[in-house]
Image (tube, rainbow, N blue to C red):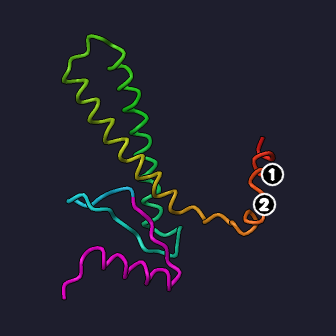
């Protein structure tokens, strides 16, 4: 019986849960576009630090590309090829930023809802205002 990628990921997730390891979505993909996950219980490990540094570089590149894109898009005489190139680069940077946001969101602790269950939603809304 041949296992699928989904089967392998589910088995890995169960093993990680039982050992206390968490899966971290890394900010890069494989050559064929598949996601990379790191199974670790050490947030300060080498690969985690490398991923943090890589995320910082990706976000800095995104800022630079955005600055250049604004210049190109503000000029009505910008050639179509340059506008297209700008769109391609922005798309790449947005893909990176969304992957980083997903990775960071997955690492947030689960909210403690035990106290919130007893509150009246109307009372909670008034407290926010």
Q: Is residue 116 above or below residue 83?
A: below
Quadrant where the N terminus is found in the figure: bottom left
Is 4 a magenta residue?
A: yes
Q: Tell me: 57 left or right of 1.
A: right
In this view, the residue farthest toward the top is: 77
State the image coordinates of residue 127 (x, y, percent, origin top left).
81, 47
Q: Which residue is mark 2?
A: 119
Q: Judging from the image, what secondary structure is the residue with disc 2 in?
A: loop
Quadrant where the C terminus is found in the figure: top right
| Quarter assignment of residue 108 | bottom right
Is 9 a magenta residue?
A: yes
Q: Tell me: 128 left or right of 12.
A: right
Q: Is residue 16 above or below residue 112?
A: below
Which stretch appears magenta?
A: 1-26
How far apart are the alpha carbons under marks 2 and 1? 7 Å
Are the residues at dot 2 and dot 1 in contact (C-beta closer than 8 Å)?
A: yes
Q: Is residue 48 above or below residue 126?
A: below
The residue lying at 47 percent from left, 56 percent from top is 52
| Quarter assignment of residue 75 | top left
The residue lying at 39 percent from left, 61 percent from top is 26
Q: Which residue is mark 1?
A: 123
Viewer-proximal residue, 129 or 37? 129
Classed neighbour count for the residue bearing mark 1: other residues with Cα under 10 Å, few (<14), some (14–19), many (≥20): few
State the image coordinates of residue 95 (x, y, percent, origin top left).
35, 46
Q: Tell me: 115 left or right of 83.
A: right
Q: Is residue 116 above or below residue 78?
A: below
State the image coordinates of residue 91 (x, y, percent, origin top left).
31, 39
The residue lying at 52 percent from left, 57 percent from top is 105
State the image coordinates of residue 72 (x, y, percent, origin top left).
32, 20
| Quarter assignment of residue 69 | top left
């Amino acid at each position: 019986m041949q296992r699928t990628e989904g089967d392998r990921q589910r088995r890995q997730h169960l093993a990680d849960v039982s050992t206390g390891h968490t899966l971290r979505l890394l900010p890069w993909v494989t050559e064929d576009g598949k996601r990379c996950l790191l199974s670790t219980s050490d947030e300060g490990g080498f690969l985690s630090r490398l991923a943090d540094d890589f995320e910082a570089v990706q976000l800095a590149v995104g800022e630079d590309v955005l600055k250049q894109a604004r210049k190109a898009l503000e000029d009505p005489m910008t050639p179509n090829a340059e506008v297209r190139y700008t769109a391609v680069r922005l798309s790449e940077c947005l893909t990176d930023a969304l992957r980083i946001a997903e990775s960071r969101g997955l690492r947030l602790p689960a909210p403690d809802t035990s106290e919130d269950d007893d509150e009246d939603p109307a009372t909670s809304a008034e407290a926010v205002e």
